C-alpha cells in the first residue's frame, strides 16, 4: 500500500529553535496554519493539526534538531499511517529543514507534497518572518 516517498528541503530565515517551536508548540502551530492544532511535547504523545485533518503521534523528538512522527490524513483508509521526518540544521542566515514522508496510500503523494509546500512551508516562512 506504500505510495512513494516525498523529500523536500526548505530554507527558513530563522533559528532552528524558532522553526522547531513553530512546528511543536500547539499555539504557534495553530497561528501559522490558521487552524486548530494540539501537539504533545514528547515521544509517544499524540498530535492533531489542521482542525483534525492530520493526526498521529510523536515517535522521536530531539529538541531543535529532529521530529519524527507517525502521520495520517483523515481521508486515508482506516489504520494507514505514514512516517514524517523533519531534520533541522543551522545554516548561514537561518535553518535548513530537510523533510521526508513515506508510507502513504497509493496515489496521494503528489497531492500531499503540494500540501506541504502550500499549507506548511509557505505560511511557516511568513509566520517566522513576522516574528523576527
Image: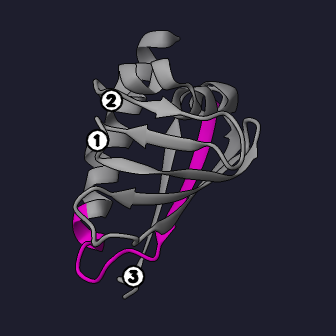
Give the Cα distance between marks 2 and 1.
7 Å
Report the residue marked by disc 1: 119
Residue at 72% x, 46% y is 61
Relative to 54, 86 lies left or right? right
Check if residue 14 falls in the magenta segment.
Answer: no
Residue 122 pos. (x, y %)? 33, 37
Label 3 or label 1, whichever comes before in sequence order: 3
29 and 58: which one is in front?
58
Question: Is residue 47 rendered to the left or right of residue 43?
Answer: left
Residue in front for this viewpoint, 100 or 125: 100
Tell me how far mark 3 sits from mark 1, CA to CA.
20 Å
Q: Describe residue 40's horizontal placement relative to residue 108 as left or right.
A: right
Q: Mark 3 highlights which residue?
A: 4
Where residue 33 is drawn, which disc sits there? 2
Task: Measure how far apart labels 3 and 2 are at the Cα level.
Answer: 25 Å
In the image, is residue 104 above or below residue 115?
below
Question: Are the residues tagged 2 and 1 within 8 Å (C-beta)?
Answer: yes
Amino acid at each position: 500500500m506504500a505510495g512513494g516517498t516525498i523529500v523536500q528541503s526548505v530554507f527558513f530565515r530563522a533559528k532552528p529553535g524558532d522553526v522547531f517551536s513553530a512546528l511543536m508548540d500547539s499555539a504557534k502551530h495553530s497561528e501559522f496554519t490558521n487552524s486548530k492544532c494540539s501537539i504533545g511535547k514528547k515521544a509517544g504523545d499524540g498530535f492533531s493539526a489542521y482542525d483534525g485533518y492530520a493526526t498521529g503521534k510523536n515517535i522521536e523528538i530531539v529538541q531543535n534538531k529532529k521530529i519524527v512522527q507517525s502521520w495520517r490524513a483523515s481521508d486515508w483508509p482506516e489504520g494507514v499511517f505514514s512516517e514524517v521526518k523533519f531534520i533541522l540544521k543551522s545554516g548561514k542566515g537561518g535553518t535548513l529543514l530537510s523533510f521526508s514522508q513515506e508510507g502513504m496510500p497509493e496515489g496521494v503523494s503528489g497531492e500531499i507534497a503540494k500540501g506541504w509546500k502550500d499549507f506548511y512551508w509557505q505560511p511557516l516562512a511568513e509566520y517566522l518572518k513576522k516574528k523576527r
